[in-house]
Amino acid sequence: MTPTPVVPPAPANFPAFPRLPADIRQEIWRSASTAPSTTTVPGVCILTLAIPIGSPLGRAQHAPLVVHTRRNPSLLGTSTEAYDITASSAPPPPRPFNPEIDTLFLGPSEFIYFTDHLTRRDEAEIPWFPEIRHLALTLTVVERGMALPMAMMDLHRLETVGVVYPGGEGGWDFEMDTSPPVSAEGEEGEGEGEEAKVLRELTEDEAKGCVIEADYVFEMHGGDQRIVWRRNVREHIGYVAATLGDFMRRVVAMENDEKRIPPTWDKRNGMLKLKYRALVWDEGTERLEFGSKEGGGGDEEDWVDED
């Protein structure tokens, strides 16, 4: 019988790496910086329409759902050489959207598209809709009357609802833009990767200190209605939670079909089992600073992730 060859484990480190020629080291860093991540970290998927609503090209369609991943923080913190090459290289290629862990961000037009497919039960066309666990919505979307509560009826696995606020200091106008940040020209390297878009949760102090003012006309079938209010973020998140809870409470009271009641409804306590998050786009997600120590390729250095 031929003995099975024993393959020794790969070494955990390579002490001779700093002695390699600079061009070889740099090529290794460059290759590693653009490699797909070996771990799946929750990210943000931005739903975009390849064919917009009302387009003469035909029925609205969404673009492929992907999550743009962040550069490897281990490489960014290894050495100044690794940092310089990784930071200037193209971001890693995107990975497919995973509704189990990723957050789906919806702008105003995308929300209309999303809810339209939900109400028409287009599960054969877009099977991932009912699997979504985490939603992030623009500030204006959550004020669209009954559209969001109605969508809740078909999101049986939903766990979190995030409201994306404008960010920045001072007061916010209700209609301020909360679109994802656009990378500066020339910031991204060549290749198919794009900079990762990251949402961060506001601190309690931020949520209490940031005030939103609304003064707009809401179009209704029975006539237009002027809406005026002023709330801080914490109050507004509470309002969103109360609105969704009240709607579901009325539905449960009238619904005879138990299958139509979402699992997110807590019958015992009469409330939705959801987490509500106040979010802003984090535009400094990959800014890293080294400590004062200087070093060459391959030497370990102190680093700080500002995220």
Image (cartoon, helix red, strand yellow):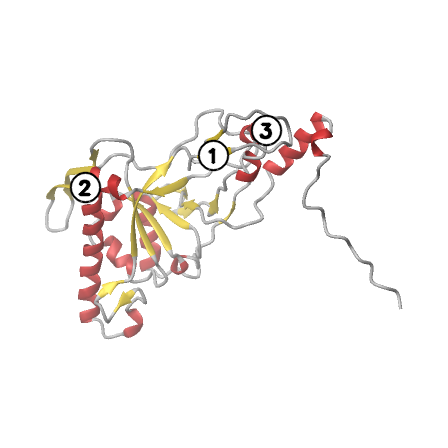
Does 277 sit left or right of 40 as displayed?
Answer: left
Q: CA distance from mark 2 to mark 3?
A: 43 Å
Q: Which residue is mark 2?
A: 232
Tell which circle, 1 or 2, labels the residue nearer the N-terminal end: 2
Q: Residue at x 60, y 33 (%)?
A: 300
Q: Nearer the viewer, mark 1 or mark 2?
A: 1
Q: CA distance from mark 1 to mark 2?
A: 32 Å
Relative to 224, does residue 184 appear above or below in the rendering? above
Whether residue 244 is visible to the viewer of this picture, yes or no, is yes
Please, what is the three-letter code of the amino acid marked with disc 3? Ile
Q: Residue at x 18, y 47 (%)?
A: 235
Q: Which residue is mark 3?
A: 85
Q: Residues within 10 Å of mark 1 (few under 14, many from 20)?
A: few
Cβ atoms at labels 2 and 3 below 8 Å apart: no
Give 55 or 106, whichever is nearer the viewer.
Answer: 106
Does 188 sit left or right of 208 as displayed?
Answer: right
Give 284 or 100, whichever is nearer the viewer.
Answer: 284
Q: Position of residue 148 (x, y in %)?
A: 26, 54
Q: Position of residue 67 (x, y in %)?
A: 47, 45
Q: Which residue is mark 1?
A: 304
Determine which quarter of the picture holds residue 173.
Answer: top left
Q: Quadrant of the N terminus?
A: bottom right
Tell which circle, 2 or 3, labels the residue nearer the N-terminal end: 3
Q: Secondary structure at mark 1?
A: strand
Q: Residues within 10 Å of mark 2 (few under 14, many from 20)?
A: some
Relative to 30, does residue 124 appear above or below in the rendering? below
